[in-house]
Each structure stands twice: as structure tokens, then as C-alpha cells.
């Protein structure tokens, strides 16, 4: 269970930090993430809102140690990885590869933890 806590802590952390960044400092976060696209001021804020809400939901799973939802976080992040890659190929904006890496850094250990039943 300790390994599951660690992987979900990473997920919660990047969702909250990234969400706050996108919601309140969109121009700075887009620059920090090497974005070359034009996303305006509103869309990054909406993305930040969703990231904060998802971070809160993952935090609740972590807090109550409700591990029956752990595998769903793996499925969701796997879909996100595929979708981010598709968005990168459409836009060629390096930000999407950076976000892909952030998600994969947490997803790969989660898959290992889940299938090894650590």
C-alpha cells in the first residue's frame, strides 16, 4: 500500500500544482512548459480548474485508501497519454510532450505497482 500511496501522491501533487498554475498563471505556465501554441487566456484556466478538481478526487482516494479505484487511475492516465500524443502530432507544440512525460513518470510506476501487487 505504501507504493500506491506514493504514486497517488505524485499524481495529486502534479494535478494541484499544474492546476493552480494553469488557472491563475496561464501565460507563465505556458511559457514554462515551452508552449509554442496560442491557447488564449481562458482555455488554460479551464484546464487548470479541471486539474484541481481531479487532484481533489485523487486526494480523496488517497486519504481514504480506497484502492478499488486505483486501477481506474491507471486506465484514465493511459487514455490521457494516448490523447496527449495525438494532440502533439496535430499541433507540434512541445508542451504536449512535456505533459506526456509528467504523466508517464507517474503512470509507469503505477502500472508496475498494480501488476506486481506491491
Image (cartoon, grey):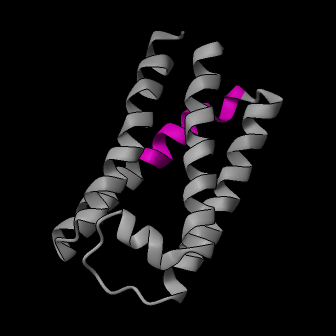
Q: Give the total of numbered labels.
A: 0
Quarter-wise, where is residue 45 in the image?
bottom right
Give residue 23's position: percent from left, percent from top. 61, 73
Viewer-nearest residue: 33 or 46: 33
Quarter-wise, where is residue 49 in the image?
bottom right
- 29 on left or right of 68: left
Q: Residue at x 27, y 69 (%)?
A: 87
- 72 on left or right of 79: right
Q: Residue at x 38, y 64 (%)?
A: 32
- 7 on left or right of 80: right
**Vertical placement of 60 versus 50: above or below?**
above
**Vertical placement of 5 versus 48: above or below?**
above
Asked whether residue 74 is drawn in magenta, I would say yes
**Vertical placement of 97 versus 40: above or below?**
above
Q: Which residues are magenta?
A: 67-77
Asked whether residue 104 is drawn in magenta, I would say no
Viewer-nearest residue: 60 or 48: 48
Q: Residue at x 38, y 35 (%)?
A: 105
Quadrant in which the N terminus appears: top right
Give residue 31's position: percent from left, percent from top. 36, 71
Give residue 29's position: percent from left, percent from top. 45, 68
- 44 on left or right of 87: right
Give residue 59's position: percent from left, percent from top. 73, 42
Quadrant in which the C terminus appears: top right
Question: Residue most toward the right?
Answer: 64
**Vertical placement of 16 versus 74: above or below?**
below
Q: Residue at x 53, y 11 (%)?
A: 117
Q: Main secondary structure of the magenta part?
A: helix
Amino acid at each position: 500500500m505504501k507504493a500506491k500511496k506514493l504514486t497517488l501522491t505524485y499524481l495529486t501533487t502534479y494535478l494541484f500544482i499544474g492546476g493552480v498554475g494553469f488557472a491563475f498563471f496561464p501565460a507563465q505556465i505556458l511559457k514554462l512548459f515551452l508552449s509554442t501554441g496560442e491557447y488564449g487566456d481562458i482555455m488554460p484556466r479551464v484546464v487548470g480548474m479541471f486539474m484541481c478538481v481531479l487532484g481533489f478526487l485523487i486526494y480523496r482516494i488517497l486519504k481514504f485508501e480506497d484502492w478499488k479505484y486505483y486501477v481506474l487511475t491507471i486506465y484514465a492516465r493511459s487514455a490521457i497519454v494516448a490523447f496527449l500524443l495525438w494532440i502533439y502530432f496535430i499541433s507540434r507544440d512541445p508542451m504536449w510532450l512535456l505533459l506526456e512525460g509528467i504523466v508517464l513518470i507517474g503512470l509507469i510506476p503505477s502500472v508496475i505497482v498494480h501488476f506486481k501487487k506491491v
